[in-house]
Amino acid sequence: MHDSNCLFCKIIAGQIPSRKVYEDEEIFAFHDIHPWAPVHFLMVPKLHIPSMAQVQPEHIGLLGRMMALAPRLALEQGCNPYPEGGFRMVVNTGLEGGQEIHHLHLHVMGGPRPWFKKG
């Protein structure tokens, strides 16, 4: 399923340029245009699912693949290895949850934080 009015569907289709991180038959990952961290990319299913609120049992495999792929992509994009390094994954859901684009997407953020002091 594809939504012709969806920004992320247009990015997946190549109608809007992006800095691609990864692509396979089900998943597209690209750099966020307004990064919150030194490493910040989005992982989206190619299937148009508006939000986590619309996830169904048939999406379990897809979401599992996204979660399993995120650590590898985070390292490839410059996040330092666990446990000293790491990354954060965020899924905003609905307006009150901070979701701006209504196509399910996983933010992956990390990288060096020069202001962070280890205890």
Image (cartoon, rainbow, N blue to C red):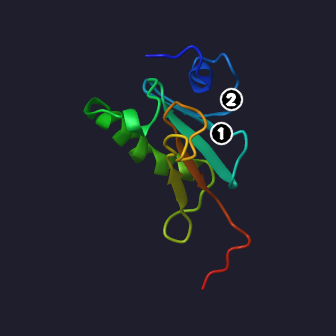
Q: Are marks 1 and 2 in contact (CB under 8 Å)?
A: yes
Q: Can you say which quadrant of the picture contains the N terminus?
A: top left
Disc 2 residue type?
A: Ser
Q: CA distance from mark 1 to mark 2?
A: 7 Å
Q: Can you say which quadrant of the picture contains the C terminus?
A: bottom right
Q: Position of residue 80 (x, y in %)?
A: 58, 62
Q: Is residue 44 left or right of residue 32?
A: left
Q: Residue furthest top?
A: 4
The residue carrying mark 2 is 18
Q: Is residue 56 left or right of residue 119?
A: left
Q: Is residue 43 left or right of residue 68?
A: right
For residue 90, above or below residue 13:
below
Q: Residue furthest front?
A: 96
The residue carrying mark 1 is 31
Task: Report crowding for label 2: few under 14, some 14 to 19, many 20 or more residues within 10 A (C-alpha).
Answer: some
Question: At numbered mark 1, what does the secondary structure look like: helix, strand or loop?
Answer: strand
Q: Quadrant of residue 37?
A: bottom right
For residue 55, above or below residue 47:
below
Residue located at (70% from left, 55% from top):
38
Disc 1 residue type?
A: His
